[in-house]
Image (spheres, rainbow, N blue to C red):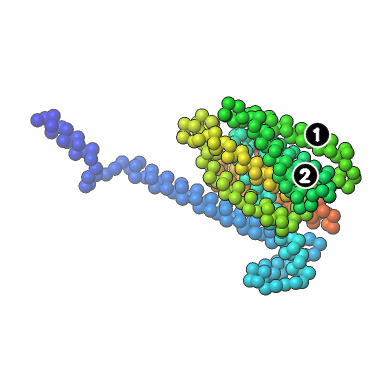
Amino acid sequence: MNVERRTSNVEHRTIPGKGHRPPASSKRQPSFVNRQLLRTKKRTVIIFGLLIAALLLVSIGSLQVGTVFFSFTRIIRMLFDYLFGITDSSMDATIVFRLRLPRIILGIVVGGGLAVSGVLFQGLFRNPLVEPYTLGVSGGAALGVSLGFLLGGAFPKLLLPLFGFAGAWLAVSFAYTIARRRRFLKIPYLLLVGVMISFICSALIMLLLSVVNLSTFRAVIYWTMGSLAGCDISLIRFAVPVILLGTAASLGLAWTLNALALGEEGARHLGIRLERDKKWIFFLGALLAGTAVSVAGIIGFVGLIVPHTVRLIFGTDHRSLIPASFLAGGIFLVLCDTLARTILAPMELPVGVVTGILGGGIFIYLLSRKSPG
């Protein structure tokens, strides 16, 4: 009887009922966690809003400046007329909508594609110094375009981006095949093979340049510096859907990239189908970088400096890092392209020169800030 009474008393005390008061810590902890999550969400929304606003302002500023300057109100008025179908056949509308706006659109998608490609490769290799061109993407594309220039009149000029795209894909496919051993993708081998492919492609380009005429030599050299000057509607129709779809697909791999931060064994313990997802990360990164290089040439540092900088703001959560890097990459490249075509006007610099100078300076500054002492 005494045992039964003690048991019933214990059960009565342990089952919360009317008048039961939970511990103070259990009452405060959920509200504290909810407040922290709410603050994080608000901060993320604010930063995304600032990035979108910055992209709009940089784009409108790029529409304004050039050999012909337009006021802010004039640009806004022309944009509203264009959106509402009001035709304007003036020279001002031709400059804005035929020359500057396509260049800005291409700059946004190319910069965003290179930045997202950098995020994917840095997450795959777990190394913030890896960029798309490390794997031979730029070397393969440059070799393909050089062959296109060498063939000259045999193919239309509009097919040059396809030559670059094919060259990039052949390079990364070869690197993937060599690095894959016994049904597993060896990440360190992939990095080393990519670097070697870049050297081989550079040597083959030098070989081609030694046998071409002077005009082809200049065209290849200028293309390898990177430029948005030759953009037209066909390039935009090719690049925009590919890069936007590739970026959207990359968001589906955000959880895998987050899990890879724990290492490959840790990711497998979380139930990630790692070999399948590594293939998708690799091929999506190569698709984005190859498309960007094929239409704009070799534009360095965007895939390196933009993900590194955005990671300092957003942290390592790829659900936010991927879209933020796309926006920041578009801002960075449009800004660099605006400087490239205005800083020494009427002469125009290759945008790859400006991204190299600005990106290298920013990266050195960030490294100096993080260095101890």
Compared with 354, 121 (above or below) is above
Q: Nearer the viewer, mark 1 or mark 2?
A: 2
Q: Position of residue 144 (x, y in %)?
A: 76, 42
Residue at 76 percent across and 48 percent down: it is: 160
Residue at 22 percent across and 45 percent down: it is: 17
Task: Please tell me the numbered disc located at residue 32.
Answer: none
Residue at 57 percent across and 29 percent down: it is: 184
Badge 1 amino acid: Ala
Residue at 77 percent across and 40 percent down: it is: 143
The N terminus lies in quadrant? top left
Q: Residue furthest right?
A: 214
Q: Is residue 50 visible?
A: yes
Question: At numbered mark 1, what does the secondary structure look like: helix, strand or loop?
Answer: helix
| 159 to the left or right of 316 | right
Question: At numbered mark 2, what does the secondary structure look like: helix, strand or loop?
Answer: helix
Considering depth in this image, is 23 or 293 the residue closer to the camera?
293
Considering depth in this image, is 57 or 199 the residue closer to the camera?
199
Badge 2 amino acid: Val
The earlier-in-sequence mark between 1 and 2 is 2
Number of residues whose C-alpha sits closer than 10 Å to that of mark 1, classed few (under 14), some (14–19) or many (20 or more): some
Compared with 57, 206 (above or below) is above
The C terminus lies in quadrant? top right
Q: Position of residue 107 (x, y in %)?
A: 70, 53
Compared with 269, 61 (above or below) is below
Q: Residue furthest left?
A: 1
Task: Please tell me the numbered disc located at residue 203.
Answer: 1
List the residue tagged with mark 2: 145
Q: Position of residue 231 (x, y in %)?
A: 75, 55
**Marks 1/2: CA distance?**
15 Å
Q: Residue furthest top?
A: 182
